[in-house]
Image: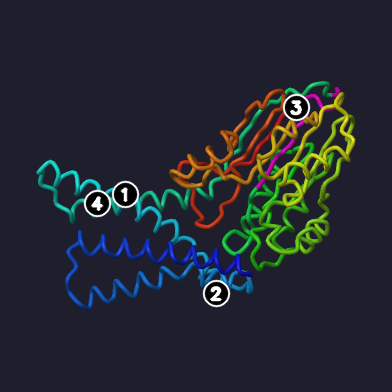
């Protein structure tokens, strides 16, 4: 509990400071001096600074139209606010450089241009975040049985079904997957966002997907906020097979799924894989939510690891952070020794429902 309180306190402090900085920028460059306008701006930004934390408390406890609207508005503002902060920083930088080199610069025109760019980028980000692309890749796995040649697997991760994206979004994803006519479907964690939601209703569209080899699910960190039992039960009720630290063999292809929490620590992850008795002479696909402990997967003879989690940073500049944190394995198809790794940018969004400099995707893998 103390960790949660500390985390919330840090987040809220950052939001307070950010909104104060935005306030000072707007007042300075727009030249706001009228007391009533200053008071309105103060109150407005103060309310916006606490909106995310307050609506998050509601979102984790209640699921209704009012809560969804309030939380979606707060999450959307978070994305706009981030771009406004970038615009404010640039404004001060340009203004400082103009002063340094004794150049005339109209601060009001400058802030208007930068805020305008931020608003256009926000609109694009909201639209882009809802347009799901189909990414197609061909993979050659060693010793692949003939039955699997030319077969397709669909990898869907990070849908984050909850207050912002719920039944309609799930239906959109499921329809796209059905239209791809996959032979097998993998759902790579963070299917749910971890907030209050009708678990059975939002996953129902996935129950209508038909794949000859079945549909398989692993947990992500958002199913692990609390007890994951309710999520696992809802997934199973939808007719989806949960791979909870277990292996299935389908016509000579080993499908391995590990739980997010249990596979976070290197030695525990290694122990889980060793207990499965992985056959190094047969091809294997490991479903693991986060692209971590690649050395362990390689040493245990895994052929292909499918991951998600990173969202490729989701918004502008954050992709550089995820690339650093995950050592370049935050997105795309890469080799790690003789281990193939594909990390998806995910189909949904977390926090602000926008994507800038990244794209949501469903991945179609053709085995050759």
Query: Which one is earlier in the sequence, the residue at label 4 or at label 2?
Result: 2
Q: Which residue is mark 3?
A: 367
Q: How far separated are the C-alphas under marks 4 and 3?
A: 52 Å
Crowding near the residue tagged with mark 2, few <14, some 14–19, many ≥20 C-alpha atoms within 10 Å: few
Q: Quadrant of residue 30?
A: bottom left
Residue annotated with mark 4: 92
**SS of the residue at dot 4?**
helix
Residue 3, x across and y down, in percent: 60, 65
First reached walking from the N terminus: tag 3 or tag 2: 2
Disc nearest the viewer among 4 and 2: 4
Q: Secondary structure at mark 1?
A: helix
Residue 21 left/right relative to 149: left
* Mark in front: 1 vs 4: 4
Q: Earlier in the sequence, mark 3 or mark 1?
A: 1
Q: Quadrant of the C terminus?
A: top right
Circle 2 residue: 66
Report the magenta residues as a range. Answer: 145-157
Q: Which mark is residue 117?
A: 1
Q: Residue at x 74, y 29 (%)?
A: 298
Picture layout, residue 139 above or below residue 6: above
- Answer with mark 1 or mark 2, whichever residue precedes in sequence: 2
Q: Position of residue 29 (x, y in %)?
A: 20, 59
């Amino acid at each position: 509990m103390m960790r949660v309180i500390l985390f919330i306190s840090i987040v809220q402090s950052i939001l307070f400071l950010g909104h104060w900085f935005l306030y000072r920028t707007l007042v300075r460059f727009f030249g706001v001096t009228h007391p009533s306008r200053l008071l309105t701006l103060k109150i407005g930004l103060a309310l916006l600074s606490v909106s995310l934390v307050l609506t998050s408390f509601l979102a984790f406890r209640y699921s209704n139209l009012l809560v969804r609207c309030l939380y979606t508005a707060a999450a959307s503002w978070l994305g706009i606010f981030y771009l406004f902060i970038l615009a404010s920083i640039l404004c001060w930088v340009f203004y400082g450089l103009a002063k340094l080199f004794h150049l005339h610069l109209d601060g009001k025109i400058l802030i208007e241009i930068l805020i305008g760019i931020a608003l256009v980028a926000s609109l694009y980000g909201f639209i882009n975040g809802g347009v799901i692309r189909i990414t197609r890749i061909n993979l050659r796995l060693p010793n692949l049985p003939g039955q699997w040649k030319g077969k397709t697997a669909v990898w869907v991760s990070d849908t984050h079904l909850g207050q912002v994206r719920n039944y309609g979004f799930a239906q959109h994803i499921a329809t796209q997957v059905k239209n791809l006519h996959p032979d097998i479907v993998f759902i790579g964690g963070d299917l749910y966002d971890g907030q209050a939601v009708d678990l059975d209703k939002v996953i129902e569209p996935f129950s209508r997907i038909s794949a000859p080899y079945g549909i398989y699910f692993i947990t992500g960190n958002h199913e692990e906020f609390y007890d994951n039992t309710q999520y696992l039960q809802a997934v199973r009720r939808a007719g989806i097979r949960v791979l909870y630290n277990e292996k299935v063999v389908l016509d000579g292809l080993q499908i391995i799924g590990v739980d997010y929490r249990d596979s976070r620590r290197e030695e525990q992850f290694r122990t889980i894989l060793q207990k499965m008795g992985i056959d190094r002479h047969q091809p294997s696909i490991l479903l693991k939510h986060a692209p971590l402990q690649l050395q362990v997967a390689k040493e245990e003879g895994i052929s292909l690891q499918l991951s998600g989690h990173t969202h490729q940073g989701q918004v502008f500049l954050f992709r550089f952070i995820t690339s650093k944190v995950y050592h370049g394995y935050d997105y795309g198809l890469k080799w790690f020794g003789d281990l193939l790794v594909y990390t998806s940018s995910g189909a949904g969004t977390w926090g602000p429902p926008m994507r800038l400099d990244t794209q949501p995707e469903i991945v179609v893998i053709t085995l050759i």
